[in-house]
Image: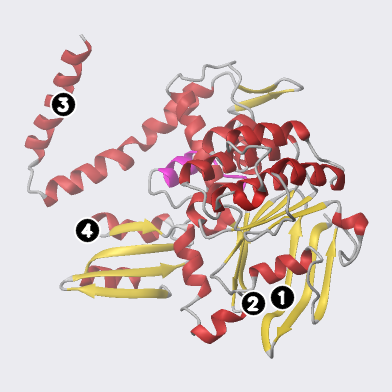
Amino acid sequence: MTPAISVTGLTRRYRGQLTLDRVSVDIEAGSVTGLLGRNGAGKTTLMRIIAGQEFASGGSVRVLGASPAENDRILRRMVFVREDQAYPDFKVGDALRAASWFYPGWSGELAGSLLADFALPRNRAIKKLSRGMRSALGIVIGLAARAEVTMLDEPYAGLDAVARQVFYDRLLADYAEHPRTVLLSTHQVDEAAGLLERVVVMDRGRIVLDAPADDLRGAATRVSGPVLAVEEFTAGHPVWDRRRMGSQETAVIAGPLGEADRAPARTGRLTLEPLSLQELVAHAAGPPAPYAQKKVGA
Amino acid sequence: MNKLKVSQVREMAGLDEGIPLFVQVAERLAAEIADGGLAEGERVPSTNELAAYYRINPATAAKGINVLTEEELLEKRRGIGMFVAAGARQRLLEQRRRRFAERYIEPMVTEASRLGIAADELAELIREVGHVRESATT
């Protein structure tokens, strides 16, 4: 299948620092992909370049088979919602009207029902909206555009857990009826985990993990119990992390465990628990970057 | 990945939560069929219904349904949806019985010996729980 988004060897230099370092990734059409990683990892820069809002220093981006840069035909088939989306001096209704002119797949009906879901008044000036309501407006536009490529960059800053749940439910419902390619960057990894078919993790301008979400469930296991039993159990497995307290030890081992691997745990007073997606992502992204490097992508 | 047998699915699901979501979907549906909540010949929820209910991707829900279809526990009726196949419940119950000792008795006996509960004491406990159940239902 032709990917909806194809990124090859993408590099972006900013003030002498590499914010994107030879990034290559294909995003399959009709799928939901999570773009994960710490702040400053390069997620926003990558999405901005895919959206044609920023230029690469090297490499190439193809969206729906063409370069998105200054390509109106492609840009109308793609929506990009940012955390810090700037709007002109508009009311909510004006922003929706402008979006309805731009996006050929726009659904006024969906926009209307989403406004009601988030209790967003049409005649309120956007600059008077709270942070959460501003995020909600971005979500309304991002979903109602029904764009073939839908990119949502931390779309729910300021939204509470209930409103985020509304977002997930409405995204799923509309996605089921109108499939599209969704790229979602989020810090709420476990909350969004069920939606994601694929997970791409970035760290310091590079892609450090790219895998189907299902493969990551059970990809690492936390083993805890008496030190000796844990040591014995983990021997021969790659160990990511190990900590001790008195006679107890907890270790994180990588790789899926088979039935035979697990058998000793039943009798050995060991507790086995799979790492959540959030924890896996944290491991994949490695230790925190020094502050100076972290600032670069922000 | 799609070629998992429901027996394997159950085995995995009995162990922990670290299993693929589509396997969990298959497992839940299989449990509903085995418990009679979904009768033979009844329509099972569509992938979109499952996706909305579990808050998962529709593709994941579809994969879960595929596991059961490949085991011929579900059958497709063109244009209408997926239905519980004839004999599905019986086959699932047989699988469950086969796995009963491994899933329930073994861990129970292990824990009992850890706690110093002797075999006849354990048997007595099981009988007591049985009595409580019976008197609760009558």
As rendered, which of A205 and B42 lies closer to the eye? A205
- Residue B138 seen: yes
Q: Which residue is at 52% across, 73% downward?
A: A285
Q: Which residue is at 29% across, 60% downward?
A: A264
Label 1 and label 4: CA atoms lie apart by 44 Å
Q: Name the quadrant of the N terminus of chain A.
A: bottom right
Which residue corresponds to mark 3?
A: B129
Circle on res. A163: none
Q: Secondary structure at mark 4?
A: loop
Three-letter code for the amino acid on which mark 3 is drawn? Val
Circle on res. A269: 4
* Same chain? Circles 1 and 4: yes
Nearer the observer, disc 1 or disc 4? Answer: 1
Mark nearer the N terminus (1 vs 2): 1
Label 3 and label 2: CA atoms lie apart by 57 Å
Q: Chain of mark 4?
A: A
Q: Name the quadrant of the C terminus of chain A.
A: bottom right
* Same chain? Circles 1 and 2: yes
What residue range appears in magenta? B1-13
Label 1 and label 2: CA atoms lie apart by 6 Å
Does residue A149 appear to the left or right of A67 in the view shown? Answer: left
Which residue corresponds to mark 1?
A: A23
Does residue A199 appear to the left or right of B15 in the view shown? Answer: right
Whether pointer 3 and pointer 2 mark residues with C-beta atoms closer than 8 Å, the reply is no
Whether pointer 1 and pointer 2 mark residues with C-beta atoms closer than 8 Å, the reply is yes
Three-letter code for the amino acid on which mark 2 is drawn? Arg
